[in-house]
Amino acid sequence: MSTNHPTIIQGGMGIAVSNWRLASAVSGLGQLGVVSGTALDQVFARRLQDGDPGGHMRRGVDQFPFPEMAKRIWDTWFIPGGKADTQPYKRPTPATKDGPRDVRELCIVANFVEVFLAREGHDNPVGINYLEKIQLPLLPSMYGAMLAGVAYVLIGAGIPLKIPGVLDALALHEPAAYPLPVTGSQEGDDTMMTFVPAEYMEGAHPPLRRPDFLAIIASNTLALTMVKRANGKVNGFIVEGPTAGGHNAPPRGKPVFNDDGEPVYGERDVVDLVKLRELDVPFWLAGGYGRPDKVREALDNGAAGVQVGTAFAFCNESGLTREYKNEVLKVVAAGSARVVTDPVASPTNFPFKVVRLQGSVTEPDVYAGRPRICDLGYLREAYRTAVGAIGYRCAAEPVTVYKSKGGKTENTVGRKCLCNALMANIGLPQLRNKYVEKGLITSGDDLSELAPYLPAEGWIYSASDVIDKLMSELSDLGEALTSMCETPVLA
């Protein structure tokens, strides 16, 4: 592993908010661009059904090393000229513990293409971000990203102890296994997911680069656990505080809520950086570090740098639709931006940040009129059925369906279908008869800090503007700190 690390890591946000365009722009400027690996199979399938505007997916598929697999995927999903606006998107079958094969192939190709496009046009490292809570697509997805030469794998929202060993195995095209948490499982149940690259490869291929693994943590306990118990090398930590966007770790100890129903975080939720430095593992600070003075503060505290999400989420290159960017940046400019930490929105039981826009389609109360349905299934919970098989349920699915699977009614209260909402955020909403899925925007608590990025007129700024501002107080630290261009990071 190289000791040359980026100062700025662009966060892996949402479903394709951190898309290949954003990651390419950031990495091309010498920092670490990161694509979101969440639901890339679904994103890729919808891009193809829209006719592949610009031909970018075709360009990536043409470089995929297994041409027969690439042809199967293309023939299945591509619609020349795009589907009719009145037609819903065809959906890939939700993944299960053991497949199905066509979904695994779609994951492999989709992750390859996203990383390939992010790496195109420069020689700098690119990363990919996954949620440990979404285990079912993990193995084939990481393999696809590694086939494209991804340099960093970032994983949070869980305890990814077995990820280092998976990366070691996949780099050699060897079988990999990962445990699937199954509610109610009993001793002797088969809850291990497996992926055998040889069953998917076409011909012989040399070993792959083993990417650096960065675990996203929120406590010293988890950092120490990862160092001592992980089944391979942990190359670094991203220390994500409760002000970061998206999913947050729950507060430690007995739950306490403020008058608005938000979870309250305390001293136990603050990572002790002195103890973290003692582990002698590089770390980046995240959550409220999207300002130049905070970058300097992080470095002064021994961090390798910072991870920034919110500032990049609303820049020109991100995957959010222009409509949603303008709605959010309008309230930022007016000084009325509001972000709340919703303790029940996510079916994962993790608190989830939501941007409140009064009267907007991003207002969570809009969901009261949405048909309750779970048809993408990325946040499903695996559970043991009465006959000992593995079933899947989601607290955001119809209440009667959830209860029929052994779920408790109280678990369904306030839950939102984040999967469909996040697809709508990027302009790929599902059409259900006359109902079009609406978005739900997430952001860090420091959303109001975006005002300095906004031009005098309009609300358009670039990833380059973000990096220039973040690095503006570091010119005295020299070129080695501000760029990785000369020495790319290799595993």
Image: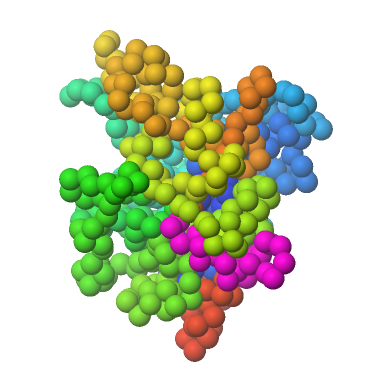
The answer to which quarter of the image holds residue 358 is: top right
Q: Residue at x 54, y 33 (%)?
A: 366
**Residue stretch rendered in magenta on the structure:** 444-465
What residue is drawn where x is 60% and y is 69%? 453
Q: Quadrant of residue 78?
A: top right
Relative depth, front residue between 39 and 97: 39
Q: Is residue 463 magenta?
A: yes
Scheme by which the image is coloured: rainbow
Q: What x and y, as percent, mark residue 207?
A: 49, 51
From what the image shows, is residue 402 above or below residue 71? above
Q: Please, which residue is most extreme toward the top here?
A: 387
Q: Position of residue 134 (x, y in %)?
A: 41, 37
The residue shown at (50%, 59%) is 447
Q: Is residue 72 in the magenta section?
A: no
Q: Nearer the viewer, residue 468 or 187?
A: 468
Q: Is residue 320 left or right of residue 375?
A: right
Q: Which quarter of the picture shows residue 196?
A: top left
Residue with the most extreme bottom position: 476
Left/right of residue 418 with respect to residue 330 in the rendered view: left
284 in relation to 402, above or below: below
Question: Percent x, y for residue 140?
Answer: 48, 37
Instruction: Determine whether 191 is above or below 287 in the image.
Output: above
**Apparent side of residue 114 relative to residue 222 in the rendered image (left or right):** right
Please provide percent x and percent y for residue 266: 23, 58
Q: Is residue 305 above or below residue 106?
A: below
